[in-house]
Amino acid sequence: MSFCALAIVGLGAACTVRGASVSDLTGSVDKGAAAADDRPASGAAPGSDGVVRQQSYKCVTLPVSEPSKMALVPAGPFLMGCNPDVDDQCRKDELPTHMVTVSDFEIDITEVSQIQYYDCVASGACLAPTCDWDPCGARVNHPVVCVSRHDAADYCAWQKKRMPTEAEWEKAARGTDGLKFPWGNGDVDCTRTNMVGCKAGLDGKDGTSPVGSHPEGASPYGVLDMAGNVVEWVADYYQANYYAISPPNDPPGPTKQEMFVGRGGGWRSVAYWHRTSTRDDYEPEYFKNAGGFRCAK
C-alpha cells in the first residue's frame, strides 16, 4: 500500500477517509464499565474501507531517536487472569485464573514513541499513522497512535523484534503474584497512570503523555505505562473463552479469529480498564487515537 497524504497544515492531497464514527467510540460492557477506548468491547468496525494516512513529511530538525530500552522478564510461572483474591471486577473472558509458564523474554520498557516510529516511516518499512501524527513537534516523545495491528507488527519486525504474546504482556505487567495493577493492588490515580480525567495531554487536556511519564506506576520488572496512556496491541487473536483451553506453557493464543487483543487501557479509559487482567478486542485494521504498542523479543 502506498502512502496517502491527508490535507493538513496545507500539505498533501486528500484521499478516501477511514475513521471511527461516534457510535464506534461509545458503549458499555459487563458491570457498566466503559470499554478501553470508550467503544463497545465487541469490536465495532469503522464505517468505511478506505484508509487515510497522514503526511509522511521530513522533520526539518530531527530529534534524537534512540531504540527503546528493554526489560528482561525471566522464565517461570505466573498467575494469569483476573485474581478474585484482590479484584472483584472479574469479567468472564478473564477467567478462569490459571498458572502459565513463559520462557524468558525482553519487552520494551516504554511504548513506541512518535519519533521512533517516524524512523520506520522514513525508511519505507512502515506506513504513517492515520491521525495525531506529529513526530517533529509537540508529540515527538508521545506514543505513536492511530496505527493498526499490521502497522505495529511491521514496526516490530523492522526493529528485529516481534509483538509480545498476551501471556508475555500480562506477566510483564503484573509479575508472578496476580497483581491487580502493575504497581500492586492499591488505588488508581493520576500519579501512576494516564487515564480519563488526568488532563495529562497537550495544553492541559485529556490525551497522551510522553512515554515513561509515570514511573510510580512501574510494573515489578520496571516496565512503564502498562496501565494507561494507550491501549496496546499484542500478538494474539481474541477468543473470549481461550483461558479455559489455553496450554500452560508459552500459550500462543487461539487460532485465527476475527479480532485481536488490546491491553492496558488508555488515556480515554476509566480505571476499570487499567487492571492487568483486562482484555479488549479490536479488528486488526482498527485505528484509534488512544491505541499504540510496544515490542518484545
Image (cartoon, helix red, strand yellow):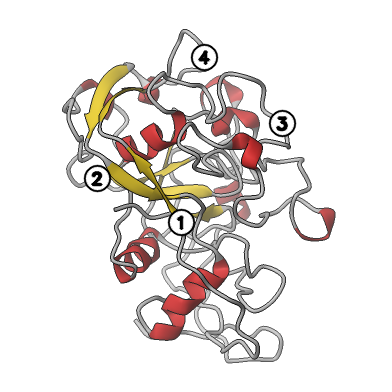
Across and down, in percent, residue 68 comes to 46, 60
Q: Residue furthest right?
A: 204
Q: Is residue 52 left or right of residue 140?
A: left
Across and down, in percent, residue 74 comes to 30, 35
Q: Is residue 30 left or right of residue 256?
A: right
Q: Amino acid at mark 3?
A: Asp
Across and down, in percent, residue 135 comes to 60, 75
User: Which is nearer the N-term, disc 2 or disc 4?
Assistant: 4
**Badge 4: residue crowd in 10 Å (few <14, some 14–19, many ≥20):** some
Q: Which residue is tagged 4?
A: 87
| C-alpha distance separating marks 4 and 3 | 17 Å
Q: Amino acid at mark 2?
A: Gln
Q: Are marks 3 and 1 in contact (CB under 8 Å)?
A: no
Q: Residue at x 38, y 48 (%)?
A: 107
Mark 3 or mark 1: which is in front? Answer: 1
| Callout 1 secondary element | loop
Picture quarter with the N terminus = bottom left
Q: Which residue is tagged 1?
A: 69
User: Which is nearer the N-term, disc 4 or disc 1?
Assistant: 1
Q: Are marks 2 and 4 in contact (CB under 8 Å)?
A: no
Q: Which residue is tagged 3?
A: 189
Q: Amino acid at mark 1?
A: Lys
Q: Residue at x 48, y 84 (%)?
A: 4
Q: Are marks 4 and 1 in contact (CB under 8 Å)?
A: no
| C-alpha distance separating marks 3 and 1 | 26 Å
Q: Which residue is tagged 2?
A: 257
| Callout 4 secondary element | loop
